Image (spheres, grey):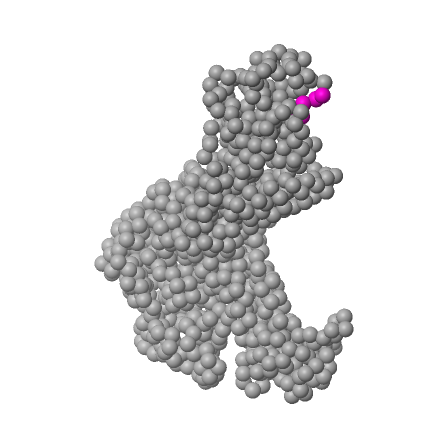
């Protein structure tokens, strides 16, 4: 009956989950093949898969622990059972088994749940279950449990007492054994009776059940007791084990489904005046990241912990939650900023703190990882600020989990491969190249997988290196890269102006192959853009292979795949593809992933972080991400590039504005980083604010081009007057914003952004008519013109001869249907940083056009755009220091 019920239950689970193949692993350290066969037979009858791990009888405890630990981490094993000699059933071994895989219910966690009465959350040891099946009507009866110690003995006594029996427990050498046997109605023997204990001590009519601790190992010697129940215990125990495995499978299926959040938010006690960012960050004690992960429904095997407060999240979660509806998707953008920035990251963090810690709505912030160039240069970090920031902020801003370093390594490996290939091709014959590219290894010569792929692209359908003709060999070994067309540069994550132009190849070993090159900042690498736009490991690998690094001398594109380096790049990026989990000051979750600049790249955090977060928050939750710089740059690229790559549809745009920036657009004096603000910015000036709102109106209109409702978040500074704040909100609403809300999250944390959160929640329920700005099938020039005229307000565009030539080349090479990623100054809607407000009547000059084929966009250069910033006269690093005693970072913002 037990087996039949288990079979029916499992059949139902399989009908609901067609891919399900539950696997029970049994570790045994004995030579009894009979018990192994019985386990297999029962499992087969139920429909379970059983894997036996047979260890030698003399295996040490450490060897068994190692095997258990391996199976604990095997995602294909849902249950784990032990068949061991008595001497190996130690607490250390039993508690090594993960409670969620403990089919025999012998770990302290399972026993604790049993004793506490959490029947739905524990598994009863099969032997104890078998005994309970054999004894009925226990009310008022006395049960003596002899020789049953440890986990099974404890479980037996608890189950017997819970079912109304009076229980006694002792060992066979107990001096009072004869008296206890005389009073017992039922005797449960947990080990073999010693020969010196006469059977006559047991009173006539006593029910005897032998369930030796190693019954399941076949060590059952109770024939002397004339006890037919012994065999039943063995069979029942195995049947109960399989029943437990089916229950465990059901629990495993439930664990794979979406879990409701059980988030414990952290309390804030804001001070006035507001301390420095790093002082605020240090004053808060973050939750351990594994605790945070559990609170938001991540499984233990879905995170890889880096220290106490950071963890990588594995992409397997997307498969587990593929049927879970997405939450609402919110983009934080901004008006054209001052050089100081207007606080988009701070608004993003304040908004999720308000949603989750104060309105009790699941929310996730998705931010870019900051480059160390600005961190040590002039801008500072990107963790937010004041009482709305990601913590620990020094870990956020410095190295994080090494993603940018991985990008640097991958980028520079590819750069090295380009120059090395040109050198080797220029100094070797076809035959010599072929012999080195396809060497004889252990007497065998063969193509690697990536070389076979190149042969197929060349139309050479051969797999034996010895069968290629001389012409085919020449086509295979020669990329014929034209050095003047190399677009792939080396990168470093430091602001270093002296790397704008460099000369490589000056050593004698390079045999005269000298060329002019440059370094870009690491976050400008196309590999960073790929990381931000990829949707899976396979997709990333394909994108890496498609990266065009130069043209050959016939004008055809040369890719990373042609250089044979795709697999190596993917290996270097295999951990970087996983988003990093952190938390806000109020203990709400944050993903930090990817960090492309918005002026020279697309300026958004990763698609993967957004997709995972949208699953985790649930259908009624919110994912809030930000786009770099003004809405004309970061937001436009978010919609036209990122949303095309992800297929996601945004629900709301939050447009961040400040009175300071609006005054600048209204004709106020220049704002310079590091210099004190002029009095126009610290005193009330309604005229400047009103005049500057033209930029806010324009950015609202840009968002409306995409059919998404806009909520304006006015980031309030202490120098802003209430009248100025009211004026901005009034004009914003009159200009088509769904709502406009003043925010004080910098000084008050999430509580200061509650009204913004309520406005966003209401806006997200509005009808959404999202659409792209242009059709991909349009010619490259026309797509550039649409962005210039509709977004920037230009009269027209002007292409340089170089730009026109590149457009013609990319169109001829088949790249004309890619979206456009404009590389333009962020300080003005136009190409001239000094032109504030809403410039009109200008002609947008396109000086050059380049292609990031792997990332999947064409990027025109508007005027001269530097891809390697320089350090100012007084960089931030003057203030940064390390306390050698406490190892704490000082002076970081």
Residue 710 or 551: which is nearer the viewer?
A: 551
The spot of residue 451 in percent (x, y) is: 63, 75
Q: Residue at x 54, y 75 (%)?
A: 548
The spot of residue 712 in percent (x, y) is: 31, 55
Q: Residue at x 63, y 25 (%)?
A: 226
Q: In the image as oriented, which residue stretches furthest toward the bottom?
A: 471
Question: Looking at the image, can residue 157 be seen?
Answer: yes
Q: In the image as oriented, which residue stretches furthest toward the left?
A: 734
Q: Is residue 192 magenta?
A: yes
472 relative to 807 in the view: left or right = right
* Magenta-drawn segment: 191-195
Q: Is residue 137 magenta?
A: no
190 relative to 510 in the view: left or right = left
User: Is 64 located above or below residue 209 in the figure?
Assistant: below
Among the 4 quarters of the image, the one containing residue 441: bottom right
The spot of residue 767 in percent (x, y) is: 26, 58
667 relative to 799 in the view: left or right = left
Q: Residue at x 43, y 74 (%)?
A: 818
Q: Magenta stretch mostly in which secondary structure? A: loop
Residue 889 or 93: which is nearer the viewer?
A: 93
Residue 839 or 221: which is nearer the viewer?
A: 221
The spot of residue 171 in percent (x, y) is: 65, 20
Q: Residue at x 64, y 33 (%)?
A: 214
How many numbered circles are shown? 0
Question: Looking at the image, can residue 288 be seen?
Answer: no
Q: In the image as oriented, which residue stretches furthest toward the right?
A: 443
644 relative to 84 in the view: left or right = left
């Amino acid at each position: 009956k037990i087996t039949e019920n288990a079979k029916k239950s499992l059949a139902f689970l399989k009908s609901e989950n067609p891919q399900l193949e539950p696997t029970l692993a049994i570790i045994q350290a004995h030579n009894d093949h009979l018990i192994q066969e019985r386990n297999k037979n029962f499992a087969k009858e139920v429909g379970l898969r059983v894997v036996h791990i047979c260890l030698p009888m003399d295996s040490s405890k450490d060897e068994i622990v190692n095997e258990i630990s391996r199976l604990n981490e095997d995602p294909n094993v849902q249950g784990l059972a032990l068949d061991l000699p008595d001497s190996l059933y130690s607490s250390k071994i039993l508690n090594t088994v993960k409670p969620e895989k403990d089919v025999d219910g012998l770990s302290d966690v399972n026993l604790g749940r049993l004793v506490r009465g959490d029947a739905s959350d524990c598994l009863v040891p099969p032997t104890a279950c078998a005994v309970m099946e054999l004894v009925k009507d226990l009310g008022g009866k006395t049960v003596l449990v002899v020789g049953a110690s440890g986990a099974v003995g404890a479980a037996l006594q608890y189950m017997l007492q819970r079912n109304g029996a009076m229980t006694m427990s002792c060992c066979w050498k107990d001096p009072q054994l004869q008296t206890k046997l005389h009073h017992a109605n039922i005797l449960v023997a947990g080990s073999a009776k010693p020969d010196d204990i006469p059977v006559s001590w047991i009173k006539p009519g006593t029910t005897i059940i032998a369930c030796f601790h190693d019954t399941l190992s076949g060590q059952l010697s109770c024939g002397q007791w004339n006890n037919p129940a012994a065999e039943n215990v063995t069979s029942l125990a195995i049947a109960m084990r399989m029943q437990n495995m089916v229950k465990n499978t059901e629990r495993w299926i439930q664990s794979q489904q979406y879990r409701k959040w059980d988030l414990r938010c952290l309390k804030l006690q804001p001070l006035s005046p507001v301390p420095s960012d790093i002082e605020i960050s240090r004053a808060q004690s973050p939750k351990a990241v594994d605790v945070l992960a559990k609170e938001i429904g991540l499984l233990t095997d879905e995170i890889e912990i880096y220290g106490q407060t950071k963890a990588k999240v594995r992409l397997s979660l997307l498969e587990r939650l593929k049927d879970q509806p997405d939450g609402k998707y919110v983009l934080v953008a901004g008006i054209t900023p001052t050089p100081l920035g207007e606080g988009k990251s701070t608004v993003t963090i304040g908004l999720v703190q308000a949603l989750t810690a104060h309105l009790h709505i699941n929310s996730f912030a998705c931010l870019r990882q900051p480059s160390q160039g600005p961190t040590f240069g002039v801008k500072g970090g990107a963790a937010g600020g004041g009482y709305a920031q990601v913590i620990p902020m020094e870990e956020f801003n410095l190295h994080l989990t090494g993603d940018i370093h991985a990008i640097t390594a991958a980028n520079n490996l590819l750069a090295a491969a380009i120059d090395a290939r040109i050198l080797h091709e220029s100094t070797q014959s076809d035959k010599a190249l072929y012999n080195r590219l396809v060497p004889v290894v252990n007497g065998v010569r063969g193509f690697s997988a990536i070389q076979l792929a190149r042969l197929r692209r060349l139309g050479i359908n051969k797999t034996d290196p010895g069968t290629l003709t001389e012409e085919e060999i020449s086509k295979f070994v020669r990329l014929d890269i034209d050095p003047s067309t190399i677009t792939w540069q080396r990168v470093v994550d430091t602001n270093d102006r002296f790397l704008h132009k460099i000369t490589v190849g000056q050593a004698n070993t390079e045999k005269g192959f000298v060329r002019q090159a440059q370094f870009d900042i690491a976050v400008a690498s196309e590999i960073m853009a790929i990381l931000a736009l990829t949707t899976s490991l396979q997709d990333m690998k394909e994108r890496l292979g498609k990266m065009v690094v130069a043209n050959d001398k016939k004008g055809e594109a040369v890719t990373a795949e042609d250089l044979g380096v795709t697999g190596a790049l993917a290996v270097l990026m295999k951990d970087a593809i996983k988003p990093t989990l952190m938390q806000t000051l109020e203990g709400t979750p944050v993903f930090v992933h990817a960090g492309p600049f918005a002026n020279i790249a697309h300026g958004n955090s990763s698609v993967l972080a957004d997709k995972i977060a949208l699953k985790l928050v649930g259908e009624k939750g919110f994912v809030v991400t930000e786009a770099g710089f003004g809405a004309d740059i970061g937001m436009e690229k978010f919609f036209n590039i990122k949303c095309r790559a992800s297929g996601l549809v945004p629900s709301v745009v939050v447009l961040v504005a400040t009175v300071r920036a609006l005054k600048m657009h209204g004709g106020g004096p220049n704002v310079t980083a590091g210099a004190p603000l002029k009095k126009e910015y610290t005193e009330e000036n309604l005229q400047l604010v009103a005049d500057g709102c033209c930029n806010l109106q324009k950015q609202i209109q840009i968002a409306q081009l995409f059919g998404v409702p806009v909520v304006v978040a006015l980031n309030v500074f202490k120098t802003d007057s209430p009248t100025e704040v009211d004026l901005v909100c009034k004009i914003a609403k009159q200009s088509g914003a769904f709502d406009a809300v003043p925010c004080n999250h910098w000084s008050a944390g999430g509580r200061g952004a509650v009204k913004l959160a309520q406005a966003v929640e209401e806006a997200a329920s509005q009808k959404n008519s999202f659409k792209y700005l242009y059709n991909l099938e349009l010619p490259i020039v026309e797509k550039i013109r649409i962005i210039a005229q509709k977004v920037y307000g230009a009269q027209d565009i002007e292409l340089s001869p170089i730009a026109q030539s590149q457009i013609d080349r990319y169109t001829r090479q088949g790249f004309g249907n890619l979206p456009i990623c404009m590389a333009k100054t962020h300080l003005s809607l136009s190409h001239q940083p000094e032109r504030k407000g809403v410039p009109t009547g200008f002609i947008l000059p396109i000086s050059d056009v380049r292609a990031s084929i792997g990332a999947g966009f064409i990027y025109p250069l508007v005027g001269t755009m530097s891809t390697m910033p320089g350090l100012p006269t007084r960089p931030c690093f003057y203030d940064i220091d390390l306390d050698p005693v406490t190892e704490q970072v000082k002076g970081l913002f």
